[in-house]
Image (tube, coloured by chain):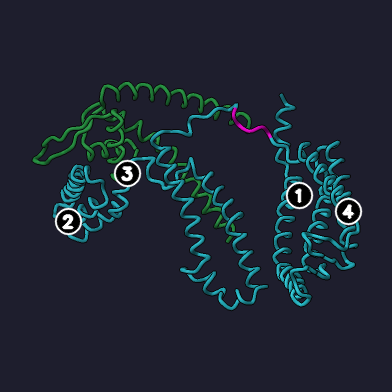
Chain colours: A cyan, B green
Amino acid sequence: MELIDRYLQAVKFWLPKGQQEDIAAELLEDIQSQIEEKESALGRNLTEDEIAQALKQRGRPLLVASRYSPQGQQYVVGPLLFPAYRFVLKVVALCYVMPWLLVWAGFILFNPPFRSHHSIRYDLLSVGGPFWNTIFIVFGTVTAVFAVLERMQSRTNFLENWDPRKLRPVVDPRRISRLSSVIEIGVNLTFIVWFTSGLWMRFISEVSGARIVLTGQWKVFFWVLLVIASGNIILSGTNLLRPYWTVVRAGLRLLADAADAWVFCWFFKAHLLAAISSPHLSPAQAAALRDLINTNLEKAFPFAVLACVLVVALVNVGRFIRLRSNGARPLQRWRRAW
Amino acid sequence: MAHSIKEETGQDAFENLRLELRRGCLVLAVLASLGEEQYGYTLRKILTSHGIAIDEGTLYPLLRRLESQGLLTSRWREEEKRNKRFYQLSAEGKLVLKQLLSEWQGIHSSLDGILKEAHCGTD
């Protein structure tokens, strides 16, 4: 009987305080009935091994106790909120953890002082390192928020209150917003006007008494930007008239974005600044300032490349994926059927 | 190898669906058996004798849940020199059982119709 007492004590440990005695008494009665029945069938008392076997069949104390938990409150994040939880985790991984890793990789690859103070072993693999700290904090926070929402949902059923009329309109992945086309045309036109009127072939600028002289490469830079901006206007104009993405136009947009990114990155590496002069600077100081600006721009080049690749890839790859997906088609078929 | 994994998955799926199917039926069987006062052990015996095997780890939590929903009443009473907890349908439980049985019969006849039709279609 000592074995049964020990079993019941272990079950009670995992039960809610207010129900411990009641449930344990009922379990005891059930175990005694089972043993009595077996004993009368065998015509003798059960051995300790046989009792142990009978208890084992009932399951671990933790498992037995868990079955008495109120239904619907056993989850940190329950099935109702789990799809949203998984979605938020994916967004956090894509928009926070991935950029964190890429920036870290950029620093490790292109910044020797950073590299000398950091290592893959500590930063990425060590449990106490910055990467796992970031993971624990970010994912822990999301889980904690959803755990609170789960509790609120189980008490108030706030997810039951919804209105189908407030659902967002159906999105056609191929549709191009006319507003965004108009904005693109406006921005590119403004840029061209400003660029051609204010910076037309200007190699020398006067800013607050200081004289800034650019190298001959500025001419190439100028024409390339002008061509890209003009191309963007033509593409956005076509998009305005025919507001649906096609593979050809998505490809052209990718090329235009890649060209923009290339020029932007080139700007960092081109050493466009030929000379600076100012009444407040000696020629040596001015030359040092020029070199400092050019060198720092060059140092920032890898990060500019990284940022451009990320932005261009995220925007354009997403567009191609949406174009290839058949998301809208079943709905269209459904509508046609009506 | 792939075949045995598939077989195992199919077996798992069957087991999950079987448990799901049984879950609702068990509630009905328990309610239907408690028109007269029973304690847990005898109730389990009654269900088993009718071909519905239920382990104590499922039965007792279910009885408590049904009691907390007001469908059962329970009281401790001494019988054969031992304290036992006896359960019985409450007035509300009787009403709910009646509704559930009508639902069950509706489902049964609908399913029967579907199965007959499907059987005709496959013949």
Q: Is residue A250 left or right of residue B116?
A: right
Q: Is residue B22 visible?
A: no
Going by the numbered disc 3, the residue's amino acid type is: Ser
Q: Chain of mark 4?
A: A
Q: Position of residue A45 (x, y in %)?
A: 14, 55
Mark 2 lies on residue:
A46
Mark 1 lies on residue:
A320
Q: What residue is shown at x 51% (from left), y 25% (from top)?
A: B110
Q: In 3D space, how far apart are the residues under numbered discs 3 and 1 (Cα atoms)? A: 49 Å
Whichever of callouts 1 and 2 sits on the residue coming sooner in the sequence is: 2
Residue contact between numbered discs 3 and 4, judged by CB atoms under 8 Å: no
Relative vertical location of residue B106 with respect to residue B82 in this rendering, above or below: above
Q: In 3D space, how far apart are the residues under numbered discs 2 and 4 (Cα atoms)? A: 95 Å
Going by the numbered disc 4, the residue's amino acid type is: Leu
Q: Is residue B83 left or right of residue B7?
A: left
- Say whether mark 1 and mark 3 are on the same chain: yes
Going by the numbered disc 1, the residue's amino acid type is: Phe
Q: Which residues fall within the magenta stretch?
A: A166-170
Whichever of callouts 1 and 4 sits on the residue coming sooner in the sequence is: 4
How crowded is the residue under tag 1: few (<14 C-alpha within 10 Å), some, or many (20+)?
A: some
Query: Tag 3's secondary structure?
Result: loop
